[in-house]
Amino acid sequence: NTVEELIKVRDVLQRRLDEAQRQNQDLTTQNEALLGELEHRKQKNRAKKAEIAEMKNQLQAKQAEQDRQGRMKERVEKELQELKDKLEGKSKDAANLSTTIKDQQGKIKKLDGQLREARSTMEKYLRDFDALYQNTQKLTEQLDEQMHRSEMLTEHNITLEQDLKAQQDEVARHKQDVGRLQRHLDNAKKE
């Protein structure tokens, strides 16, 4: 009886242990999920902080740009006033120059005539130069062709000289052979 009770107690404890392990596993899974969610939120929080810092930097940059543009506007307005003052002075100068321009226009017409004449002369020179250049080009081509022919003839002459030398050497060898044969013949007749 006691053994059966112990077995029952053991079975009950085993079921409780299994249940506790299941609950422990479930809690571990939930804990990991919560830790993942926490890390995800921390990352989001860091991203938001970085975004806020970037926006602050952009705001500071825009403020600096606005200040710079304000200073630039003041500078431009000052320059504009200076230019207006200069313009008034230049207008007076322009009136004086108008008279000078009329005087110079007569000179310009005279110079235009001289320029047309110089252009005509230059065009003639250019035509003459072009003709001379064309003739020079033809002569250069002819010279190149003559030089090429001369090189070919030189090479041909060298080849002929080499052939002639070889034939002369061959004739000399034949003469030596004939001389030897003649001596042999003479010796043979004497015997």
Image (cartoon, helix red, strand yellow):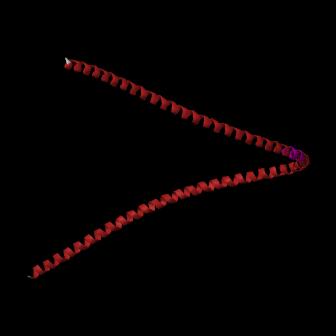
Q: Position of residue 31 (x, y in %)?
A: 42, 28
Q: Position of residue 135 (x, y in %)?
A: 59, 56
Identify which residue is drawn at 82% across, 52% down: 111
Q: Nearer the viewer, residue 175 or 34?
A: 34
Residue 23's place in the image compared with 189, above or below, is above
Residue 153's place in the image compared with 78, above or below, is below
Q: Is residue 122 left or right of residue 16?
A: right
For the record, the magenta segment spans 83-89
Principal secondary structure, stretch drawn in magenta: helix
Q: Is residue 90 left or right of residue 168?
A: right
Q: Position of residue 165 (x, y in %)?
A: 31, 70
Is-magenta flag for residue 86? yes
Q: Residue furthest bottom?
A: 190
Q: Residue furthest left?
A: 191
Q: Position of residue 8 (x, y in %)?
A: 24, 18
Q: Quadrant of residue 87?
A: top right
Residue 126's place in the image compared with 58, above or below, is below
Is-magenta flag for residue 27? no
Q: Is residue 144 left or right of residue 79?
A: left
Q: Is residue 172 left or right of residue 117?
A: left
Q: Nearer the viewer, residue 6 or 41?
A: 6
Identify which residue is drawn at 38% across, 63% down: 156
Q: Residue furthest front?
A: 2
The N terminus - image quarter? top left
Identify which residue is drawn at 51% across, 30% down: 41
**Figure label count:** 0
The C terminus - image quarter? bottom left
Q: Quadrant of residue 55?
A: top right
